[in-house]
Every structure is written in structure tokens, then in C-alpha cells.
Amino acid sequence: VNVWNQCASRLVGYSTAEVMGHSLVIEFITKDYQASVQSVLDRALEGMETANFEFPLITKDGARIEILLNATTRRNEHGKVIGVVGIGQDITARLTQEREYSKLIDNANAPIFGVDTQGRVNVWNKCARKLVGYALDEVMGQNLVSEFITKEYKDAVSAVLDKALKGQETANFEFPLITKHGVKIEVLLNATARRDEQGNVIGVVGIGQDITGRIAQEREYSKLIDTANAPIFGVDTQGRVNVWNQCARRLVGYNTSEVMGCSLVQEFITEDYQESVQAVLDRALEGVETANFEFPLITKAGARIDILLNATTRRSEHGKVIGVVGIGQDITGRIAQEREYSKLIDSANAPIFGVDTQGRVNIWNQCAMKLVGYSIDEVMGKNLVQEFITKEYRAVVSTVLDEAMNGQETANFEFPLITKHGVRIEVLLNATTRRNEQGNIIGVVGIGQDITGRIAQEREYSKLIDTANAPIFGVDTKGQVNVWNQCARKLVGYTTEEVMGHSLVQGFISNDYQASVQAVLDRALYGEETANFEFPLMTKAGARIEILLNATTRRDEHGIIIGVVGIGQDITFRIAQEREYSKLIDHANAPIIGVNTHGEVNVWNKC
């Protein structure tokens, strides 16, 4: 050593005095590098200089540092070689970083490979080894394109590598690799130019992803889309068709080649809907998706079909919006059916109305108009309960509607409506929950019957029964009294309150007749009516009166048996008279005989 600058002193730790005159190779170079460093020095002493030679130096503290050296021949003024000057750089940290990078590349969970300027493999990480099946020694130095790329992709892969060697890098290039076992795998590649420290291109590094599974899945999805039993179409950012599945082809009549690249809106949507459909597509291209949008498509044959559409934003793998996919349903038949149902509802001969979740009228058919007198314009959007129900019924009608809004439907609910002319009409209502296609409750539909006349008639019948000059009583299916008219009250002496809900047989029939009266009621509850049945009733005063009864089955409006009505006659006096006549005949002082229609004796008195 005859030159040792300050930087060398700081870096290695030895002062100039400690190194001057000492052998550089013997005293400061690690044994494993002494021969190669000596060789560099010897060549420089022969005038053959060396650039970028890497070797280690041992510091005074025993640490190893890595040096990148340019070894330059030193000459005197006569040109005679008098030594070597080395200008170095401390590349310890850089080498540490390179080793770390190398380790990261080798252990990365993505296949990474590299080629030199001749296309020969010089990087092949563990993931690439696992994926393709070739070990390092089987690929290093081999031509990547010639040995491992399928024939039909060799030109394209070569072009990507050539461009990268010229500094034109390629992202997301798909190509196939052939594994050691002959399996074709799909790789998505970023090809990056590899440069030395001077910036010279020395090869290409490819960082890949195994997209074999993804491509298989995409193909499966593509097949599912194409074979789905719903029409599916897609447009790019310009609104041009780029997806058109089999169901769309069958439904609309155009094949793929006839629609691809054409403007969906301009060519296949009716003029009156072009603006609204374009608005839906524009919103989806801004990321605002639309569900359940109805619009018409025109078929090749010129027919109009109605589509219910979900417009979904389509994005690239980087999340960039690249178009819109529409998944539709052909609702032409359903809309025709809805129109038919709407017509049936509107023209039904029963009043039908509907309210939304706020109780505002949104259905009001012709029969409701005729019955109540209000036109559609006068009721639509108005609160049904507040505007058209009498005060005393508002709370109960609100409860019925609220229950229906919670899915609890009500049948045969009676309530009054006030007509436009202030007349009160009685309505028998079935309140049915109304749901949309997702099953969400959106309101209530009421199908009614005008029972004003029937109620008036019932009241008249009730009055006739109550004022009839024959005793009339009724029992429910348990035999408890639920009808007891004025004549029955006068005859037996019990008021309505004293008999209602009590057992007729147990409370008012003498013990000796309870079984036979119960049998008559039981038969009537099975639909077998009885005429002219005689039985006794006990009055409140304890007297026994004789009744001649017609027991009639009582049914509701559905024909279900709900009890028995008995229409009676008080035959107490007639029976007493018959007994008196019988006694007179038997005790007469003249012989009296009687025969029936067959001539058989049936009267034979004492005389």
C-alpha cells in the first residue's frame, strides 16, 4: 500500500501509518478472495485495467465490507507501470439490499422469471418452479420462448420481450406456459426492462400471476351468462352492445353479429323510452346502479316486448368502469296479465279500494266510484280513514289497516263509508296485504261488499222475530241461548239478560224432557230439522207450559251451522182442553166408540 486516502481510513478503520507498506492482499483481503484480487492487481500491473470488480475488505474491527473497484494502472512520467490505483465504492448496503430483493423475489408468491438480452432464462423463483415444475438447473440458460411457450404464442411473447429490451414495458399480457408435465397454464404478465447500474438494459424480468383458475371461471361465467334463461346484454362506455346472450337472441330475434357494436338505445329502444334508458345507462357508467327498471325493446319482427332490467356497472380488474351489464326479465306476459287484473279490478261488480303504507288511497275501482260517488281524482292520494270513515269507526278501521300492513289480514270486517252525498253505507270488507315482487308490504287492498240492504233486512228480520206473536228462541252450537224474543219473555217470564248465554236445556227444561229436547237440538245442529215437537218449559214463576216446536238449523253466509232457532206455539191451553174432552168422553152416560181410518178401535169409553 502506498496510497490510502481519508475515506479509506474512515471506512476500514486503519490509519495511513497502519497500512503504508503493508501487503493489501495478504493483510486486508479475506482468504477466499485473495487469489482473484491478486489477479486483478497483476493484470493492472500489465496494463489491463479492470472495472466494477467486487471484493471484500476486512475492517480493523473485523467487519467485512463489500467494495466495487475500478483498478487503474499507475504510470510514471515515462509511461512505466509503477503500481495500481483502486477507486472504490462501498457497496455493502447495496449488496445487502440486493440479497434481500433476491430473497424476496425467490420467495414471492407470484411466479417471477427473467431473461437476458438473448432471451435466456436467468431468474426463476420458487413459485415459478412450483407452478411450471422445472428446477433451476433445468431452465437456467435455456431460451424461454423456444422451450416453454406454445407455438401459437411464440411470436407474441417474443414481441413483448423485444419491446421490453427496448425499454417499452408491457402490463397485463396474457400468455400460456407449458409445465414439465405438459399442462398448459395461463399467466398474466408484467414485463419490465432490467437495467444495470449505468441504466443499460440487460434483460427482462416478468412478474406473473397464475390466472388459469380465473380464466376457467371467466369461461364458466361467460357460458352461464350465454346460456342463462334470462336476457343478458352489455354495452361499453359508448353505449355499444358488447354482450348479447342466447336468451336475448331468442327473445329479440337478432343474432350476436347483428347487434355487436351497435348502439343499444338508438337502434333497439322505442323513441318514447330512449331518453330514460340512456339516463339509466349513464348513471350506471357513473357507478349508480338501477334495479327493476321497466322499458320496451323492439324485436327484429317489429314486436314490442317489455323488459324489467337490473343495470349493473361493469368494471375492469382495476375497478375502472368499462361498461354496463343488464340482466333482464321478459315481463311482457306479466304486464299483459297485470293490465288484465287491473281491468278486472276496475270493472268488478264489488267495490275495491287500496291504500299505500301511509293509508293514502291508490286504488279506487268503478264500483267504488258508483257506490260512494267520488271519482278517482277526488280520492287518489287522500287518507281513507280521515276523509271517508265516520268518526266512531276511524280507530277500528285504522287498526284493521295497520294489522294488514303487518301481514295480519282481516276477513268479513263491517264498517261504514260516507258517500259524497253524506249517506252512510255499510261495507263488509276483506282487508288483504299488498306486496311487491320482493315480498315487501306496500299497502292494503280491500275487497268489499255493499251490505247496506242486507243489514237493513237483517234489522227488519230481527225486529219481526222480536215482535212476533209466537215464542222464538235460539241457541248456539253449545246450546246456549242467543235469541229470546218478546213473546218468549212474556210467556216464560225471564228477561233477555236473564237467559242470554245460559244453557236452554239445563236451565229451562224439566228433568224428564231434558234428554229428548237435547236430542232434537243435536239433530238440528247436524242439519236434521224437527217439526211439531212438544216439550215443556218452566216459567220464572215455576209453572209448566207446553210448547209445540219447529226446530230449524241456523247457518251463516258460508252455509256453516252456527246454531238452532226454535219457533214455538204455547199449546198449554189446547192440551188442557184436550184432556178435558177426553175425560168427558170417557165418563159420558152413553156408549162412545171411535175407529181409525183402518176401522181399528181407538176410542172405547166406560159406558
Image (tube, helix red, strand yellow):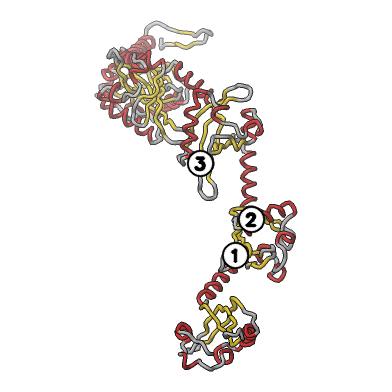
As drawn, the label of residue 22 is none
Question: Mark 2–mark 1 contact, CB under 8 Å?
Answer: no
Location of residue 121 with respect to 65 vertically, above or below: above
Judging depth in this view, the residue of 266 and 459 nearest the camera is 266
Badge 3 marks a residue whose secondary structure is strand
Q: CA distance from mark 2 to mark 1?
A: 14 Å
Which amino acid, by three-letter code, is at mark 1?
Asn
In this picture, residue 554 sits left or right of residue 107 = left
Q: In terms of sequence position, does the residue under pointer 1 or pointer 3 come before the other?
A: 1
Q: Position of residue 399 (x, y in %)?
A: 32, 32
Which label's residue is closer to the chain start, 2 or 3? 2
Q: Is residue 399 above or below residue 488?
A: below
> Which residue shows up at 63% across the image and 62% down it?
204
Location of mark 2 (residue) = 163
Direction front: furthest residue? 78
Give the residue type at disc 2: Lys
Q: Mark 1 falls on what kind of element?
A: loop
| Residue at the image point whose x is 51% and y is 23% from the top | 271
Residue 76 falls in which quadrant of the image?
A: bottom right
Q: Which residue is mark 1?
A: 200
The residue indicated by pointer 3 is: 313
